[in-house]
Image (spheres, rainbow, N blue to C red):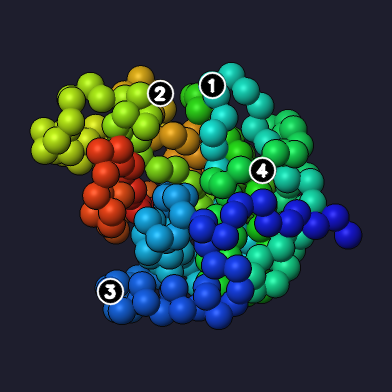
Amino acid sequence: MRIRNRSLEGGWYPGDEEGVRAAVDEWERTLEADPDRTAGAGVAPHAGWYFSGRLAWDTLRRARTDAETVIVAGGHRPPGSAPLAAEEEAFRTPLGLVPADRELAEALGAYAPLEADRWADNTVEVLLPLVRLRFPEARVLWLRVPNDDSAENLGAAAARAAANLGRKTFFLASTDLTHYGPSYSFCPKGRGPEAQEWVRDVNDRGFLDALLALDSRDVIRRGNEDRAACSPGAAAAAIGFARALGFTNPKLCGYYTSRDVQASESFVGYGSVVFE
């Protein structure tokens, strides 16, 4: 069996089951009790758990309870590139091996040719332990989506492929929002409170509003032109998947920036959106 092993260093997420469960237990004390668990798709951040794990978990805890497969769609793919899928049969996590849904990958490939993802990337891996905890019996399809207008069609194709297989599926898109400050060579509003307000209330808010409007073109535009997201293609694919299966009631579950966790001139926005 081909297994994809962990590639991220220990600071990204815990290395053992006890650490994973302890982190989730801590987040649960701060999150809404008994949320609706009816979402067919969601968008979650992918920074290290110290910064954004709580929002990522809040997205997953709202997913439909009957999911047999979770498509985890990451990004960091430039416009015009091919969508990628992992070829391994399983993924190693601190909670054990997560089986891959190779059947769904092949079915999707009939609609949209997929190239092999042979590179280490945080956008999918960092979410896999949370998927395993939320859905201990589910399989995973590891995707990485280009940041262009083909993304919505890819998401819709994934919905058709899952429906044709009779596979109850949750689509989890992975993206962080604005990367601001000298570390990211992006300081259009200088530094200080004005910059923080612009990121929060203008750049990130505009991207989140586009998600809530189910406007995939604006999601792609804001991600690429306004630098409001690092993986807007994944988010646009979530819209295509949600539309195709009728999950068209979007909800903003939470938002903050890394400055709310640890003060720094360079900071990143994080948001959680689900489609119910």
Residue 181 sits in quarter: top left
**Residue drawn at the location 30% of the way across and 49% of the way down:** 258
Q: Which structural element holds mark 2?
A: helix
Q: How far apart are marks 2 and 3 (CA)?
A: 33 Å
Q: Distance between the residues labelled 1 and 3?
A: 38 Å
Asked whether the residues under the numbered discs 4 and 3 touch, taking CB atoms below 8 Å apart as contact, a structural biologist would say no
Q: Which of marks 1 and 4 is nearer the N terminus?
A: 1
- Outermost residue, left side: 194
Amino acid bearing label 4: Ala
| Residue highlighted by disc 3 | 30
Q: How far apart are marks 2 and 4 (CA)?
A: 22 Å
Q: Residues within 10 Å of mark 1 (few under 14, many from 20)?
A: some
Where is the N terminus found, in terms of image quarters? bottom right
| Residue highlighted by disc 4 | 120
| Residue highlighted by disc 1 | 79
Q: Distance between the residues labelled 4 and 3?
A: 32 Å
Asked whether the residues under the numbered discs 1 and 2 touch, taking CB atoms below 8 Å apart as contact, a structural biologist would say yes
Q: How crowded is mark 2: few (under 14 residues within 10 Å), some or many (20 or more)?
A: some
| Residue highlighted by disc 2 | 224
Amino acid bearing label 3: Thr
Q: Which structural element holds mark 3?
A: loop
Instruction: Give the label, 2 or 4, closer to the camera.
Output: 4
**Residue drawn at the location 52% of the way across and 56% of the way down:** 12
Instruction: Give the label, 1 or 4, closer to the camera.
Output: 4
